[in-house]
Image (spheres, rainbow, N blue to C red):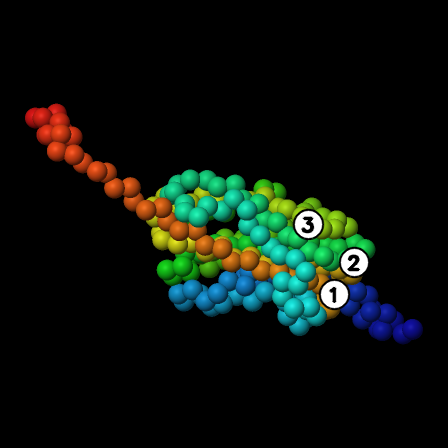
Amino acid sequence: MPPIQRTLIVLALLCMLVMLSAISSGPPVQTTGAPKLGTFAAERTCSQVGCHFGSPLNSGGKLEILGLPATYVPGTNYPLTIRLTSNQSAPSPRWGFELTCARLSDGMGSGSLFPEGLNLNLVANRAYVSQNVSHLYLGQHGSVEWQVSWTAPDTSEGPVGFYGCGNASNGNFQAGAGDLIYTLGETTEASPVPVEHVTWGRLKSRTFRQR
């Protein structure tokens, strides 16, 4: 084999290894499947040509976010579990995900996401949490979980959407068919402002105390 040809093959293999390492350490940022919100464009998912494709979205499993309250209290921290369940039957599957949150009014990030030993990227006023090489759950079947916490904004910002994309890949390090992609979209509403019912007796009591 001519030296130039060997050099080109080696370079191609090195590039492939770098790409595969990058995918294992976390998906491309902004691949959560979040819808268009305000001036923020809709985000793609990993289910696309050149990445992971071949099966319909959300086939044989689901991506869930556990612990998200129906209504949030400003400034409160909520421990969250991201659970990915799949019937991926490959001998050595690899698992991954990406999650973000944004207020529905304009698409801006809301509150603070805190990953537990996971990746955290801040892009365009949004936080993105994803798996890294130590949380791929190589060879595990059935379902896997990642731990994240969210601290709600200090003041009410209206409803906040959580969007995520999960990947139960077949572990062959090749983009294409055989990988299963899942998405989630959940919303938490702002807690209503408590209304204090003031009686005539309580009002008189306050008036006398202020004198």
Q: Amino acid at mark 1?
A: Gly
Q: Which residue is mark 1?
A: 178
Left or right: where does residue 24 sit relative to residue 200? right
Q: Residue at x 65, y 57 (%)?
A: 61
**Residue 163 at x, y percent in the picture:** 52, 57
**Mark 2 vs 1: CB contact within 8 A:** yes
Q: Which residue is mark 3?
A: 143
Q: Quadrant of residue 210?
A: top left
Q: Which residue is mark 2?
A: 90
**Residue 199 at x, y percent in the picture:** 16, 34
| Few, some or many residues within 10 Å of mark 3 (<14, 14–19, 20+) | some
**Quadrant showing the N terminus:** bottom right
Q: Helix or strand or loop: what does disc 1 sit on?
A: loop
Q: Helix or strand or loop: what does disc 2 sit on?
A: loop
Q: Residue at x 60, y 55 (%)?
A: 63
Real-space CA distance between mark 3 and mark 2, rounded to the nearest whole angstrom = 14 Å
Real-space CA distance between mark 2 and mark 1, rounded to the nearest whole angstrom = 8 Å
